[in-house]
């Protein structure tokens, strides 16, 4: 734009030219922070981080929770204070209940009755009430082949649990099965489990019923 007779004062002389306006618009356009449809990176990273925290947090809680079994809760409470004069001092059998439910009940059933033809009963079993030397071996190394329990024959496999359960846990769970469902046999002590584990350290493979009947009384 320049001064013409129609525009003697050249009003636009100091104003922006078309070009400079377009230029300015283009600059502003490219500076706009939000392009439509785009996401900026930071909130996505934060979202991912929060998801990760929730995810691993849940795994942590499931892993370390105690499933609110009252016996477990109480046993922890008792252990927390050695001089605890609280009302309950749990017996081995009581401590063994949660171990039983977690490691044995799928096969032998929560009521100890087993499954006919597949898993022998522990309730009323002459094996459970008999030699502790035998049942400790069964839990540590497993058992397979024909076995008669309460007059019925079974021929199946019980997997070894010696690597899964500590001596005290084996003592507690066997004390539980020996005193539950009307069974009446004395506690199994952890020291006995430790001794049997040492005595059988070189044993490989599962036990069979005939092998076990040569041991104990
Ligand atoms: C995978 C299934 C399974 C699990 C888990 C299992 N058992 Fe067994 N158990 C068996 C089978 C099967 C037999 C019989 C094996 C055979 O036929 O030779 C048996 C036999 C026994 C016997 C001797 C027979 C009897 O009925 O008295 C005892 C005692 C026993 N199990 C205790 C336990 C204890 C205690 C646990 C948990 C620490 C446990 N079992 C976990 C399947 C299982």
Image: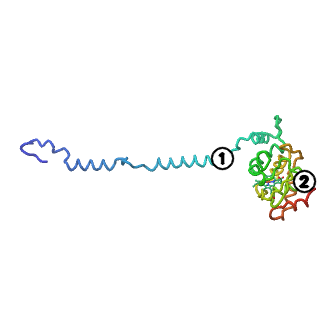
Residue named by callout 2: 131
In the rendered image, residue 194, in percent from the top left (x then y), is placed at 85, 55
Left/right placement of residue 26 relative to residue 9 reads right
In the image shown, does 205 or 8 lie closer to the viewer?
Answer: 205
Q: Quadrant of ligand 1?
A: bottom right
Image x and y of residue 25, in percent: 27, 47
Q: Residue at x 23, y 47 (%)?
A: 21
| Residue 174: x %, y % from top left | 83, 49
Crowd around label 1: few <14 · some 14–19 · many ≥20 (10 Å): few
Which residue is nearer to you in this view: 82 or 91?
91
122 lies above or below 213: above
The image quadrant of residue 161 is: bottom right
Q: Which mark is residue 62?
A: 1
Q: Secondary structure at mark 1?
A: helix
Relative to 96, 23 lies left or right:
left
Could you tell me which residue is drawn at 81 percent across and 49 percent down? 173
For residue 164, which quarter of the picture? bottom right
When asked about the image quadrant of residue 117, the answer is bottom right
């Amino acid at each position: 734009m320049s001064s013409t007779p129609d525009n003697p004062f050249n009003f636009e002389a100091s104003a922006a030219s078309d070009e400079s306006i377009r230029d300015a618009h283009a600059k502003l356009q490219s500076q706009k922070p939000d392009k439509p449809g785009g996401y900026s990176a930071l909130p996505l990273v934060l979202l991912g981080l929060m998801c990760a925290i929730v995810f691993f947090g849940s795994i942590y809680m499931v892993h370390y929770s105690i499933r609110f079994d009252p016996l477990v809760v109480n046993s922890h409470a008792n252990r927390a204070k050695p001089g605890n004069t609280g009302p309950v001092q749990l017996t081995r059998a009581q401590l063994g209940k949660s171990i039983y439910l977690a490691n044995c009940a799928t096969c032998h059933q929560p009521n100890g009755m087993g499954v006919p033809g597949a898993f022998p009963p522990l309730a009323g079993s002459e094996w459970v009430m008999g030699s502790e030397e035998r049942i400790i071996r069964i839990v540590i190394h497993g058992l397979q082949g024909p076995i008669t329990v309460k007059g019925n024959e079974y021929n199946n496999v019980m997997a070894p649990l010696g690597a899964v359960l500590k001596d005290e846990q084996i003592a507690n769970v066997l004390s539980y099965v020996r005193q539950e469902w009307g069974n009446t046999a004395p506690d199994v002590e952890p020291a006995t489990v430790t001794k049997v584990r040492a005595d059988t350290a070189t044993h490989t493979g599962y036990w069979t019923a005939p092998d076990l009947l040569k041991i104990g009384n």
